[in-house]
Image (cartoon, grey):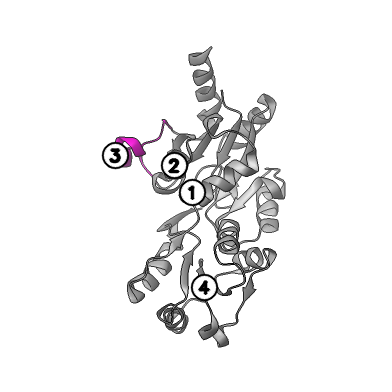
Amino acid sequence: MIEGAVLDIDGTVARGRKALPGALEVLADLRERGIRYAFFTNDNQSPIAKWVDKLAGMGIQAAADEIVTSALVAAEAVAELHPSRRVLAVGNVGLLEALAAKGVELVEWEEADRAEVVVMGKDPAFDQQRLAVVCRAIWGGAEFVATNDDPRVPIADGFAPGTGPMIKAVAYATGVEPLVTGKPSPWAGRMAARILGVAPERTVVVGDQLATDIAMGRAAGMRTVLVLTGSSAREDVESVPEGHRPDAIMPSIADLPGLIDTWEAEVA
């Protein structure tokens, strides 16, 4: 029944730099069942190599091609939609490396007026000056692409602002809404399916956010499971239309093997 799994990281498999209880056992169980899985994070700051090391530090062994970030998805989309166009990248090393790997021509901040596309992620150096530069580029006709617009992300002791607040500041000032390519966009679902090589109807998405993880899975035709160890709570499910709700809600990822057993029993 289930042959592939797309697993969110922050708030689902880990919190901060620690794996959540039961996560390691669940990953071992999936391997034993022959279920392929990939980690999908809307983080856009860290390069893949850093995510491999971070997961390894938690005891989670993951190959580079088993990890997808919103920076990778944005780079894929920009290379396809805007080939040979000059790009101003607003973000950290993860976004810069992803764009460079796709052969995208990047412009420096000093020549931002030459930019034909603005690709924006979470920029630790973002301030009023950079806000003004980005807005001028968009006012000048540059296309506006965003890696993701998550309002907040889970961290070890609570939450931190996500990429969304920066994206919203630019959108509000320019009156231009960006093309958002990370979860839950079709771009994200397509990349997840391609990496796994598993039919959507035989894939389950497990995540902690209704608006990103669950929405992406639903749009891609995958089964969806919401865990309650991150951003969304059980009562949040009641506030969304029935067609946008997850197929199942679990206290944590530790409950995934039991859920898969139940699904398999239903079709046996």
Number of other residues with Cα within 10 Å of mark 2, as a class: few under 14, some 14 to 19, many 20 or more? few
130 left or right of 242 in image? right
The label shown at residue 186 is 1
Give the extent of the magenta segment: 232-249
Q: Residue 172 appears at what percent x and percent y?
A: 33, 71
For disc 4, the marked residue is: 117
Compared to 136, does 89 lie above or below?
Answer: above
- Depth check, mark 3 against mark 2: the one in front is 2
Sequence-wise first label, 3 or 4: 4
Magenta stretch encompasses residue 146: no
Residue type highlighted by circle 1:
Pro
Measured in 3D between alpha carbons, the distance from the residue under mark 3 to the one under mark 4, in whole angstroms, is 34 Å
Measured in 3D between alpha carbons, the distance from the residue under mark 2 to the one under mark 4, in whole angstroms, is 27 Å
Element carrying mark 3: loop
Name which residue lies at 40% across and 58% down.
151
Name which residue lies at 60% across and 67% down.
83
For disc 2, the marked residue is: 219
Residue type highlighted by circle 3:
Pro
Sequence-wise first label, 3 or 2: 2
Magenta stretch encompasses residue 246: yes
Name which residue lies at 54% across and 83% down.
114
Q: Residue 139 appears at what percent x and percent y?
A: 40, 80
Q: Residue 152 appears at what percent x and percent y?
A: 42, 57
Of all residues, the one furthest to the left in this rendering is 239
Residue type highlighted by circle 4:
Val
CB within 8 Å, label 1 to label 2: yes
